[in-house]
Amino acid sequence: MFDKMTLQVLANHARAAAENMAHTLHRTAHSAFVKETQDFTVMIMDQIGDTFAVPMELGATWYPGLTYGRAINMVEEEYRPGDVAFTNDPYSGHVATHAPDTHLWKPVFSEGEIVAWTGGHIHNTDMGGAVPASLSRSLTEIHQEGLRFPPMKLVREGVFDEQIMKIMATNVRKPALNNGDIKALVGALGTGERKVHAMIDRFGHKGFLSGVAALKEQAEAQARSILSEIPDGEYIFADYADEDSDEANPCRLKLTLTIRGDEALLDFTGSDPQLASSLNVPSGGDPRHTILLVGIYYVLYTLNPRILLNTGLTKPFTCIAPEGTVLNPVAPAAVGMRSLTCARLRSVIFGAFAQAIPDRMPAAPAGNNCIINVMTRDERSQKTVIAAVNPVVGGGGGMPHRDGSNGSGADAAYLKNTPIEITETEVPVEFVRYGLAQDTGGAGRWRGGLATEMAFRVFTPDSRITARNRDRSFFRPWGTGGGKAAGLADMVVNPGTPDERRMGSKDTAILQPGDVLSVRSAGGGGRGNPLDRETWRVVRDVARGYVSAEAAERDYGVILKDGEIDEDASAKARAAMPAPGEAFFHYGPERDGYEARWTDEAYDRLTEILAGLPIHWRFFTKTEIFRRIEGTGAGAVNAAFDATCARFPELPRPAARAEAAE
């Protein structure tokens, strides 16, 4: 039995081991997306494949609760020292969640048995498929999203399987980057293996095994302690992605969070059906899949920054994601843009917890981490270049005791900035703008963080741009407790010219020589009454360029003359401004207008109808109902569905509607 001090020493050793793995990968990776943006993970797992150690300094932060157990067991060959297995198939083993994420794992042996695994993933720049970088919302089936490998051995006793590497190289657009990043990850797994042996040398074979089990138990106990302090109850929240596909109807996610004592149930019933686009999240129906719980890790860590980050955190939580929905699709549904839907997953989790513990939760972060990929011709080298230019990340929501972070939303801060000098060296583009966007943070006692704005020029014909995770161009990040919703995202080709084209939430564009692409994220929502914000903070925001003088007067009642506050005029303006309404959430006029037609009652009726249909009919039927709906409420949905059935007599009718028709 480990005492608390010894257990903490083991936890420190395990985290340090994971940090060493991360630094090995970071320093030896080939692609900018891994070595600069840091879209990768590394971890150390116990005997059954549960994660018990992750780094905090480098890499993505989605995976502390990930288990590799199913994927490990799908490899039919016996594991031997020096083996490395891998997969990137979202429908095999529930480890990879889209094809560009290549997951590797390596057994660690001691005294003739596997005592641990080292593992992790890199996001490949490209895995082939229909579009450069393999990802676009417009794709409709997994086969369009690139080459997939089910769980299998990549390295046998230290020797790479060259046949697999050749198959990959033949089918991807930038094989050297893929090969280089994969070999860098293999090196990182070796670093982790050595660190595990060092822990075994210190704590002993049996001591190491019992200590790892104790780490998971401690994390579970910490999570249960947090839940036990939250009031029991049922907390319901919904949020939307702007467009469910090229059909451009919104996609709703709905959560009913039930907290009872030290356990929580997350029921996503009422969320949209499986989509004919790549926004689906391949959870496999796992009640504790890490991708469904990603927002939970943020909440738990916010409430206890000393919490251990491992699979034990997932034990008090159970998720319900009905099969055939956007959060539990069946093959061959496309899943490449699942990160956009995961951002909305975080939003609904944050919104539910904001009702349960309003004094401790922030307003909504931007909820969109737009990643720009460019495929163009480099006239200097006479080669085609495919590269990630930069993530365009939005602002964080206003916090309980401070403003939201600018340009680094709390739900996507792990994606690092790539200096423009590096990008311009590696990719033939010219940056003309990169900075914070004024007036995009939601007004509040604590202002939401500002959005990021980036613009660059291309020089060669038919340069293809993929801007994945484009969202929040219609539904704003919400404010709380009197705070206002944030500014919207946008993408524009040739802004301010006669050739200007606004792209909305579209995620692909073809640019010609001299064209400029401008991308702006959303801001973060405001928290608390804007009239409670000290005037000196507003004046400072104006001086820094965060807030315009016009917005200072409109949103805060602060009037400036020649950069100085007019105290008397400001006092009168503030006294004349209406107090915030009683509603806890402020969504903005776009969502308010949308929900005037699509009420909770109407949308719940829609999802009830769709759930009664065969999976392959659901998205089609949703789209047809949206085309035909007139009026508001459940009755309007029923009428639109009846009209759809009349137009398409082949459409199966749910039992309740069929009986009503008779």
Image: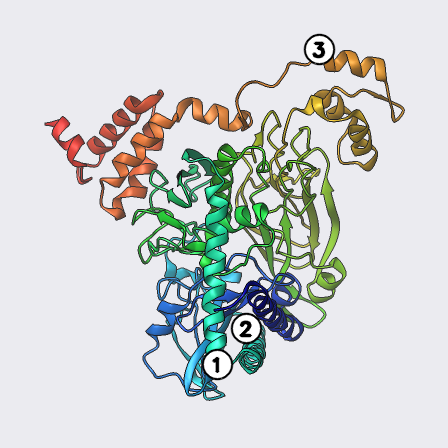
On screen, residue 293 versus residue 602, left or right, reads right
Q: Dot 2: few (<14), some (14–19), or many (≥20) neighbours within 10 Å?
A: many
Q: Residue at x 50, y 64 (%)?
A: 215
Percent across and percent down for residue 172 are 49, 71
The extreme left residue here reads 662
Q: CA distance from mark 3 to mark 2?
A: 61 Å
Q: Residue 205: which disc? A: 1
**Quadrant in which the C terminus appears:** top left
Q: What type is the residue that disc 3 sits on?
A: Ala
3D distance between C-alphas at marks 1 and 3: 72 Å
Q: Nearer the viewer, mark 1 or mark 2?
A: 1
In the image, 326 versus 443, the foreground residue is 443
The answer to which of marks 3 and 2 sits earlier in the sequence is 2
Judge left or right: residue 338 versus residue 326.
right
Q: How far apart are the two marked residues, 1 and 2, measured between alpha carbons? A: 36 Å
Pointer 3 local density, CA inside 10 Å: few below 14, some 14–19, many at least 20: few
Q: Which mark is residue 178?
A: 2
Label 1 sits on a secondary structure element that is helix
Q: Amino acid at mark 2?
A: Asn
Q: Which residue is mark 3?
A: 576
Q: Note whether residue 242 is visible.
A: no
Amino acid at the residue labelled 1: His
Residue at figure coordinates x 47%, y 62% from the top left:
216
Q: Is residue 579 left or right of residue 205?
A: right
